[in-house]
Amino acid sequence: MKARGCVDGRPQREYTDKEEASSPTMSLKVMMMSCPIDAKEGSYVHVTDIPGALLHANMKDTVHMVLKGTITEIIVKLEPTIYRKYVWHNKNESPIYGTLQAALLLLKLLSSALEKWGFTINPYHQCVANKILGGKKCTIIWHVDDLKVSHVSKDMVENIIKALNEKFGKESPLVTTWDKVVEI
């Protein structure tokens, strides 16, 4: 099970306008409606995660990160003279995964790529995109960096995953699960 939550986004709101930092996400209703449609149409479904997706977002502001555990130790070992002075210990500190602005920038980047490939973004649900491929509808729905791609042709779905991997998987390939039945 994978989960993510934001404890308190208010500090980011102090210096970022809502329009620059609000990312719509796929609603539970959209997800629940898409599953029986995929089943009725006999679609192949690939569920994929873009590793480090928020790193694709080109942030214009300075971002401060809190790193913990093994990654901190590795970074310090790489360049101890540079990074050791920034390491401090506070058991009450919470780790940071992403920012409000990065999620919106990723949405724009992903939407732009899909539109470039001929997909139409749903005007009512900005995390839903459709395209007719081989005479049948291909649907992509997503929540931040987790995508569900479905089409009746397994080859069509795999071609979309390949294109997504070429665009977003340069540093680390997409993590994908697929079949006619996907257990999440």
Image (spheres, rainbow, N blue to C red):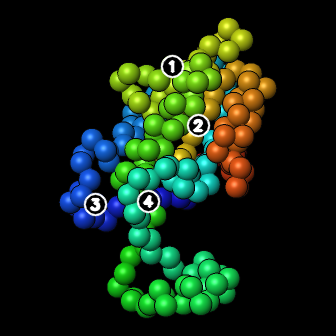
User: What's the amino acid at mark 4?
Assistant: Gly
Name which of mark 2 and mark 4 comes first in the sequence: 4
Mark 4 → mark 1, Cα distance in angstroms: 27 Å
For marks 3 and 2 on the same chain, the one whose residue lies earlier in the sequence: 3
Q: Nearer the viewer, residue 109 or 183?
A: 109
Q: Is there a contact, CB below 8 Å, between mark 1 and mark 2? A: no
Q: Earlier in the sequence, mark 4 or mark 1?
A: 4
Give how far apart the Cα atoms at labels 1 and 2 are. 16 Å
Mark 4, secondary structure of its residue: loop
Give the spatial CA distance, label 3 vs label 2. 29 Å
Name the residue type under label 1: Thr
- Marked residue nearer the N-terminal end (1 or 2): 1
**SS of the residue under disc 3:** helix
Mark 1 or mark 3: whose residue is earlier in sequence? 3
Image: 1 above or below 150: below
Q: Position of residue 127 (x, y in %)?
A: 45, 33
Image side of residue 146 versus residue 29, left or right: right
- The residue that disc 3 covers is 12
Looking at the rendered structure, which numbered label has been put on residue 148? Answer: 2
Q: Which residue is mark 1?
A: 120
Label 4 belongs to which residue?
98
Kindly identify the residue that appears in the image at 59 percent across and 19 percent down. Answer: 118
Alpha carbons under labels 4 and 3: distance apart: 11 Å
Kind of element beneath mark 2 = strand
